Structure formats: C-alpha cells, structure tokens
Amino acid sequence: MIDHPIPYGHQFITDGDVQAVVEALKSDYMTQGPGIENFEKDFAGYLGCRYACMVSNGTAALHLCALALGIRPGDKVITTPITFVASANGFRYAGAEIVFCDIDPDTYCMDVAKLEEILKASPKGTYKAVVPVDFAGYPVDEEKFRRLADRYGFAIVVDACHAPGGSFSDSRGDKQMVGNCRYADLTCFSFHPVKHIATGEGGAVTTNNPDLYNKLALYRTHGITKNPDLMTKVDGGWYYEMQELGFNYRITELQAALGISQLKRLDWSISRRNEIARKYDEAFRGMDIRTPFRAEGITHAFHLYVIQVGKRKELYDFLRENGILSQVLYIPAHTMPYYRQFGWKEGDTPAAEEYYRHCLALPMFPSLTDEEQDWVIEKVIEFVGR
C-alpha cells in the first residue's frame, strides 16, 4: 500500500541541481549570460550536432523552426495527430495549413508509408515541412523521412521533446542520436518538468545548418543582432539592429544552470527509464495488455510508458481511486474544435483514433521507486484480471 499519489511523470531535482541554481543566482547574470552558451555547447556536444539554440519552451522551439524555414500563410505542413497540440500549433502560428498524417499502429509515430501516400497525391513542393514526433520517446527512422524529403522537396523538423537520449540505427547500421541532425534539418526539445531534462520551462532547437541557426538566434531575441558581420552599420559598442520582427523566446541563466546539471544525468535517466519499462513488460506478459513496441537497433527514451487496454476509462478511474495518477496521452489533435473548423473530423486518421480509445500512460520517471512501481503493477493486474 502506497500512502501518497503517484503521478505519471515527475521532475527529479538533486542537491547538485539546487547548488547549480544557487551559484547562478550569485553570479553577475540572471539572463543573457555565459551559462546559456555553455548549456548550448554541452547539449550540442552530447547530441553530436553543430548548433543548439536554447529557448523558453518546446512550443517556442517549434515556432522558431517555422520562422527559420520561412513558413508563410497557406504553406502546407504535415504532422501527426498523436502528439501535444504544440507540434501543429508552432507552425500554425506562422499561418501554415496543417495536414495530419496517420500513425504506425506499432510505434504510434507518423507512418512513413501513409506519409508517402499523401505526398504522392500532390505535386512535388506542395508541402514545405514534415514534423514527425518521437512519441513517448520512440525515435522515428529519420533516414526514411530524409529519402522522402529529398524526393518531394520538404524540410524535416523532428519534434523530439519526448526523446533526448534516444537513438536509432540507420541503413548502414550506424547509431544516430536523436537531435544530431544527420538526417533532419531541425530538431526540437522541451525541458518541461516531466521531461528528461527539467528546467521548469525551456526548450532547444538543434541543427547543423549555420543559416538556420542564425535565423533561430535572431528570431529568439526580438529579431535583434549585435553581430557586426550581420549589421548594416556599426555606430559603436552599444549598437544593435532589429532586422526582423522576432520574439522574446530566451531562456534564463538559472534555467541554463539547472539544464547543465541535469544533462549530466541524462544517460542514467534513459537507463533507469528502460529498467522501469522492462519491469512493466515482464509483469504484464501474457495479460490482455498491450505494452510498448521496440524495434531492434533503437534506444527508446521512455518519456512515457503507454499501455493499451480494453476498458481504458474504467482502469483510469480505478487507478486514481488507488492514488495512481495515470494519464491519457494524447487526444488526437485533428479532433480538437480548433482544427475541426478546417474540415478535420473523426475517421480521418483511423489508426490514431483506435490508439486513443485504448491508450493509458502509467507512471514513468527515473525517481519512481520499486515500491511505487510494484503498487502500480499490482493495481493494474488486479483490474485487468477481474
């Protein structure tokens, strides 16, 4: 018996994290200081990409990608319905027309075959960007998306907010870290408290393209630059230029300090999450519970551990009665009233809608104790075994 609520996700803050933030508070900078650049260098180094641009949250990261790619009103962008609505909204902010592609029923990520069907149905160049989501931490095969991008002429923006530390193997058998941008043009991350790196709010965009990075950095800070190589003139050391209409999407020094500290534990977090997942797998083996799929050659980041069950609402309610705060993630984005106004309706993405009818995310976070997980397992088995 556990006498406290168990959430589906939770931040893990150590004394070292606290000390890092205290040191940032005592420094000369609270924002726009050296800590942000250090966080960017550390993050890019971990992932193996050239550039990381730290921003205020994952939604801002997606919006900045739309701006950097020059998305304009009426441009068509494809994403998946099984995601938080920000994956679509970030591009909608720039005026894009959002097209939803159904999911692979095994991985719950965008179905590459269904994507190709959409692309074939229109002239090349119709779609400006495709935004696959590494849902629950399962890394999409970015190489397959790259082949389609080269054939049909679109940019790839991977929403990897669930998947820092995840990886996949390409056709050569080489391990590709999510966010290294070997195949993607841009990759987005979130540092929300339930994510692997928790800075309160915060996010990042990675890329290997210097032009895209410069646009991200410009739009992040009101469209302002102090880089003399980019300015039309230089009046003195104080001088800056606003060259585009940008946004205040900056991250703070305090968040950067916390992020640097948490990044050091990312490998441990991925290992611990996979340990928790294996225990769930084994406990539910042989039961009428569908557990997460993993292909060979991938490292699942396990932001979420999603099962599928027959009586989902009844199980959800039963678990809550026993202090287990499981969650349904996500309601298909195309069924939201906002997107229905553009003609989207139930039945447009059958695999996504079937997934939604049965999905339930169980507690998954690295500080979940064995006793807490045992309680979750006991209650799930008690209900399903009735």
Image: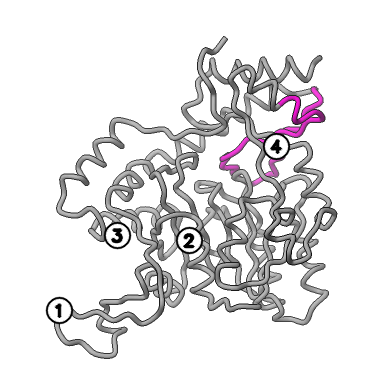
Distance between mark 3 and mark 1 Cα atoms: 21 Å
Q: Is the magenta stretch mostly helix, strand or loop?
A: loop
Q: Is label 2 in contact with label 3 (beta carbons under 8 Å)?
A: no
> Which amino acid type corresponds to the residue marked 3 in the rendered image?
Glu
Give the camera-side residue of 191 and 74: 74
Instruction: Between label 4 and label 2, give the one nearer the viewer.
Output: 2
For the point 51% across and 34% down, the residue is 271
* Distance of label 4 from label 1 (alpha carbons): 56 Å
Query: First in sequence: mark 2 or mark 3?
Result: 3
Find the distance from the CA under tag 4 to the CA under tag 2. 28 Å
Amino acid at dot 1: Gly
Residue 5's tag is none
**Label placed on residue 37:** 3
Which residue, given by chain and number where applicable, does mark 2 sit on? 61
> Residue 237 bears which disc, if any?
1
**Between discs 4 and 2, the one toward the N terminus:** 2
Q: What's the CA distance linking mark 4 and mark 3? A: 37 Å
Q: Where 110 falls versus 359 (above or below)?
A: below
The residues colored magenta run: 287-315
Please state which of the two labelled residues, at mark 3 or mark 1, is closer to the viewer.
Answer: 1
From the image, which quarter does the C terminus lie in? top right
* Residue type of the residue flagged with mark 2: Ala
Q: Name the residue under label 4.
A: 292
Q: Is mark 3 on a helix, strand or loop?
A: helix
